[in-house]
Image: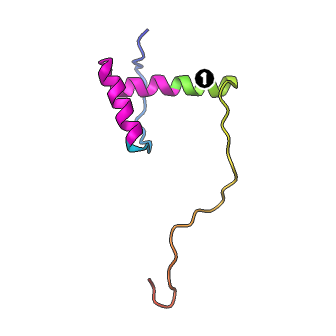
Amino acid sequence: MSLRHPEVVDRTWKVRPDQAEALKAIADEYQILHSELARALLDYALAAVQSGRLRVEVRPSRYELVRLFDTERNE
């Protein structure tokens, strides 16, 4: 089965450096394209979530603190 799809979209996802390196290492070991492995792993994870085999646990988060600044000094 080929995982190459004629219709793919370019997306930018933020991953940790160790995740990117692990994906690269595994893809290189099997001599496959990094994007092919990423798509296969994403398909696997999405199917697991959709089937209920894997659950996503979340907690409410409304705001994220970006920084504190002094309004009098504009810093």
Q: What stretch is highlighted in magenta?
A: 18-42
Residue shown at the point (38%, 32%) measured from the top left = 22
In what element is the residue under mark 1? helix
- Residue annotated with mark 1: 47
For residue 58, side relative to residue 23 (left or right): right
Q: Which colour scheme is used?
A: rainbow
For residue 25, side relative to residue 55 (left or right): left
- Answer few, some or many: residues within 10 Å of disc 1's Cα (few below 14, many 20 plus, some between 14 and 19): few
State whether residue 20 is above or below residue 29: below
Residue shown at the point (43%, 32%) measured from the top left = 9
State whether residue 16 is above or below residue 30: below
- How far from the left and from the top, in percent, is residue 19? 41, 37
Quarter of the image for residue 11 reads: top left
Pick the quarter of the image with the C terminus: bottom left
- How far from the left and from the top, in percent, is residue 37? 40, 24
Q: What residue type is labelled 1?
A: Ala
Quarter of the image for residue 50 reads: top right
Query: Residue 3: within the magenta?
Result: no
Quarter of the image for residue 6 reads: top left
Magenta span: chief secondary structure: helix
Residue 44 vs residue 5, the one in the foreground? 44
Residue shown at the point (42%, 44%) measured from the top left = 16
Pick the quarter of the image with the N terminus: top left
For residue 66, side relative to residue 2 (left or right): right
For residue 58, side relative to residue 6 (left or right): right
- How far from the left and from the top, in percent, is residue 46? 58, 27
State whether residue 19 is above or below residue 25: below
- How far from the left and from the top, in percent, is residue 48? 62, 24
